[in-house]
Amino acid sequence: MRESWRTTPPLWSLAGCSTPTSHSSGLPTPMVNGDGPQQVILVQVNPGEAFTIRRDDGQFQCITGPAQVPMMSPNGSVPPIYVPPGYVSQIIEENGVRRVLVLPQPEYHPGSHSPLHPAAPPPHAHLSAFIPHPAMMPPPPHHMYSPVPGGAGDMSSQYIPQYHAAHFCEQDSHSPHTRPPFLHRDDRTSKTYERLQKKLKERQGGGGGGGGPAKDRTGSPPPSPQKNHSSPTTDVHNGLGQGPGPGAGPGKGKQWEKTKGSPCTDAEPEELDEESKTIQALLSTLSKPVVTDIQARTALLTWSAPVVPENGDSDESSQKSLPEPLSYEVSVSNSGKDGKYKAVYSGEELSTTLEDLRPATDYHARVQALCLSLQGSPSEPVSFTTLSCEPDTPAPPRKANGTKNTLVLQWKAPCDNGSKIQNYILQWDEGKGTGEFEQCYYGPQKQYRVTKLSPASRYSFRLAAKNDLGTSGFSEVVDLFTSCSVPARPPGPELVKAGVTWLCVRWQRPASSPKEDEILYALDMEEEGSGYGFKPKYDGEELSCTVKSLRRSTKYKFRVLAYNSEGKSNPSQVSEFTTCPDRPGPPCQLVVKGKVQPSSFKMAWEPPKDDGGSDVTKYIVEISEGSSGLQWELVYSGAAIEQVCDGLKPGCSYQARVYCMSEGGQSPLSETLQVQTPPVPPGPCPPPRVVGKPKAREVQLRWGPPQVDGGSPVSCYSLEVGGVQEEYREVHQGPELDCTVSSLLPGRTYSFRLRAANKAGYGPFSERCEVSTGPGAPEPCRAPHVACRSPTCAVVSWEAPPCNGAQVSEFRLEWGAAEGSMQICYSGSALNHEMKGLHPATIYFYRVQAVNVAGAGPFSEVVLCQTPCSVPAAVTSIHALREGDLGRGERAVGGEEEEEEEEEEDGGERPSAPRFCPSTCLGLRWEPPCDHGSEITAYCIDLGDRQPITVGPVTRYIIQHLQPDTSYRIRIQALNSLGAGPFSHTVKLKTKPLPPPPPRLECTAFSHQTLRLKWGEGPAKATPADSLQYQLQMEDKNGRFVSLYRGPCHTHKVQRLTESTSYSFRIQALNEAGEGPFSDVYTFTTPRSPPPPLKVPRIERLDDHTCEVSWEAAPPMKGDPIIYILQSMMGNSEFRQIYKGSATSFQVPGLQPSSEYRFRVCAIRQCQTPPDLTGPYSGTATLSSQRGEAAAAGLAGAGPRGAEAARAKRSLSDEQCAALILMLFAVISILIAFVIQYFVIK
């Protein structure tokens, strides 16, 4: 089949492929990309290959490699690939890009069929993509794609890891989503898959001699043919059309179909078995999807799963159910039913929500079912149209024109989203800058003139569009300025920095111009001697400019002028600036003059060809040792053009470079001159030194390399030895830096000398080294003997061993409590040693070693001994018990209390432990000492002048019956069966003073709910220096005293009490000595409370001369009745009593017209015992009477409003007013929520 292709501009971001081939012309590797009906294919022609295309006029054009030919498919299909014998084509997809690969077939035999799953190509060296010149591209007319058999392309190495046959499965070219090649299968799906795999293997086994590689493809999915329904006459599988290619006869078409198979599909539909065809047919039975819930930007799409037909006459294969799970692909098109479809969903659900749709747009949607690697035909498309909505947010308005007092604004219409825009809303901030906007225009026009503005002022504007469905959001706020007067003459330009070809110039804003005025600047420049005058170089609002592309060492003149919409200012003063000279070029022709010596050479150079516009002042020569060139050393600086470099090392490589200096700066570095100095023999080595001590018959020597190696690495060393009357002889030769000389005699003196050699020869001998061999180490000693003189002292004795030719100089005795941690405790020439300071009842280990001038001999056997038991050690740690620990049941002095404790334990009941007073008791605690092998039986406590106290084997004790505020010196001694140990160190402890007595408690102030109590003499507030504190307690209803206050203050206010009630109190004092005794109980009584104030009375007019005053009733107080007093005042006179009684209302007669009356009321508590208690008066209520209209006003009351009414209406109560306010607030909240829901959210 022929496909029409046309060339496109080159693609610059594609990689190439290369494959070695023996054919004269190669078949290119096309790469397909694009998701529309037209797709781009990149044909890469490798070096040595050719690509042939046929034009519409029937002529052929041959393009030789290397080249890349981009071509475009008008119908979106992959062109037919004609492969020569021995090659197969494969289609792979990588990141949404499909590639058709033509690969050599392994184990190819002529006349055989190509394998269904060819093996992966071997990795080859990567060949970078060749980007052709436009002249190499073929001419623009349309061509017929007709590849010439011969070559085969191969993938580059960067694509080899992604080339696996098990993952080659082509997808729809429009779909941006990729689906996994393998899905989770259940048992039924697995069995169906196994049957397909078995039939696939059988078909591959009978395909001919080319089926060898198919045995390695058992894990790949079965082929999945896809049909392209875009063409009514041709079925396309995987983008490859069926049928013979151009120029192929009937016999050649069949052979072509067998050769062009891909790893995922078969070329012929007949190769699919009946079961695969049945599954594919069932997948194609999808019904037309249904669209519901259509909104402006979303819609809900639902569909039904493929239905298996129930027909009793059908065969068994048609009755089989589909393997599960099934997946579905949803594609959407907005360019018509037959337009471009884009995949928007892939999954197993039967519904999806289409999002990101455009309002008022026609869409077509279709569904395609997939199972395993098979896919059915797409369903019939369903069409729907999205709803219209409010316009999009418009762009900010722009300034079209403006003067000092006017601004002309223009804007563009946004997308109307299906409903024509009726009006535009333009708002501004009126130049206030507060962020609050007011509407200045409402209409259908797209421009508006704002007048009556202030000059040089800023105004903020924003725009919104409105159609029949609503109003869009406001645009971004844009700030616009009105014009002002012509700017003043600016000052002259200033030079910021000068360069070789540029000058950075800056200028100042005119001083008289306001900051709000928008001023632009024009910079003019004149080159000296050019004769062209000033030319513009900059025009803008910046205050600086860098003028480039200038000449070096040239003078230029600059001037600047300012302008705005009103006009231009006069030019500034002319400023002259000069560019800098350029740096010179590098010196050239570096050469070595004469012969290179081991420590010096002479070099010369030529001056630079370009001096940069100024004379060279000096040359600088640098050399670097080695070939790395990391560190350079300055060796010359002057005007000469040659230099002798001396002080070099022989046999070293040096690099030399030169640069020069002028007024224009430093030149670049010259080329590097490589110099190699010849080597010399190495210098003398340091004399060898002895490693360790010389042994009896051998000596180990070590030496270092010579300080000077002569420019060549040292290859070997020669060591010679000689005696007193013996000649020197060589005992070692080699590159090592140490040597062990053996076969020596003990006690002899030998002389050693050393020399080094390199490729230049041997160097001089080193200084001589005199070495004497020593005697051998002594033999090990016999086991030593130990005699214990006391528990802390022992005598160790031993015998001298054989000395092996040298007298024993010392003995070393190691002693320790553990065998692995012994330490040297004696070193000397004696044969015994007395060990002191030992611990009683302890096992010790010891051993002996003999030492002479030859070294230390081995140790003797390890011997152990044990010291006898002794009296206990001294108590080392004595501490005083804290005050809180004295009440934890510590036992006191005397045996009687210990007997009582035993009796209490025998009786089964133990009373609470007594609390000891710190003023007469001292508590001690100590750590038990070492018992030295005998258990401690008792402790002796020494108090100095008092008789010592003996206690049992305890570690804490409380001493009683001591004097308050007295110091005692205490020490403790431990006792065991062998006697008493030493006393501990003396500890000085002191008892505390006695606690203070309680103060006198008084009541200084009282009310019906509070009592203020005072005690002692002192300020009301505490000071930091107060050490005395007080605790105040009050008796509760249960007869228990509860703590009210604890602190250093002398007063306390007791609140929240009950009236006419008696309360009992007590107090105690505390200090560092402890808590003192409680005082006697004090009783204080609170008085009765007066009635509370009443609210403002309410007034109701009955007629012109009578009114009724009412007030709220007060509750009785502890059974005492309440009466009321009502007072009135007319005009500015004084209040007088008009009523006294228990009623809560009173009718006032005899009111005078045109007079103002005021009323107030108070409550009186009638106590059972006199006197009565009168409460405060309420607020004043006012009654005004004018021409028959009465209004009673107060702090919280209101009278009748209509004088014409027959009966006056009563005022609302407080509860009714609160309910009315709450209802009004609820109604307003509901209205606000409704407005937000309707205008903001929707």
Image: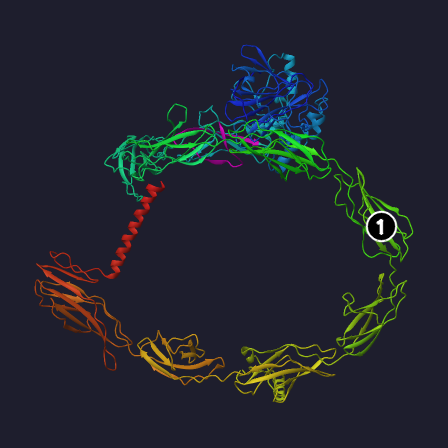
| Along the viewing direction, whichever of 659 and 95 lies nearer the viewer | 659
Please provide percent x and percent y for residue 995.
48, 83
Disc 1 target residue: 752
| Along the viewing direction, whichever of 99 and 1128 lies nearer the viewer | 99
Please identify the residue farthest to the right as the structure is shown.
Answer: 725
Residue at image point 7% right, 63% down: 1153
Q: Is residue 602 above or below residue 208?
A: below
Residue at image point 23% right, 73% down: 1175
Is residue 381 part of the magenta span, yes or no? no
**Magenta span main SS:** strand
Please provide percent x and percent y for residue 1024.
43, 74
Check disc 1 and report its element: helix, strand or loop: strand
Q: Is residue 560 above or below residue 231?
A: below
Residue 596 located left or right of residue 30: right
- The quarter of the picture where residue 978 lies is bottom right
Q: Amino acid at mark 1?
A: Phe
Please provide percent x and percent y for residue 245.
60, 15
**Local crowd at mark 1 within 10 Å, few (<14), some, or many (≥20)?**
many
Residue 471 located left or right of residue 607: left
Quarter of the figure with the N terminus: top right
- The quarter of the picture where residue 674 lies is top right
Is residue 925 in view from this perspective? Answer: yes
| Along the viewing direction, whichever of 989 and 192 lies nearer the viewer | 989
Q: Is residue 1156 above or below residue 1231?
A: below
Is residue 343 part of the magenta span, yes or no? yes
Q: Which residues are magenta?
A: 341-370
Quarter of the figure with the C terminus: top left
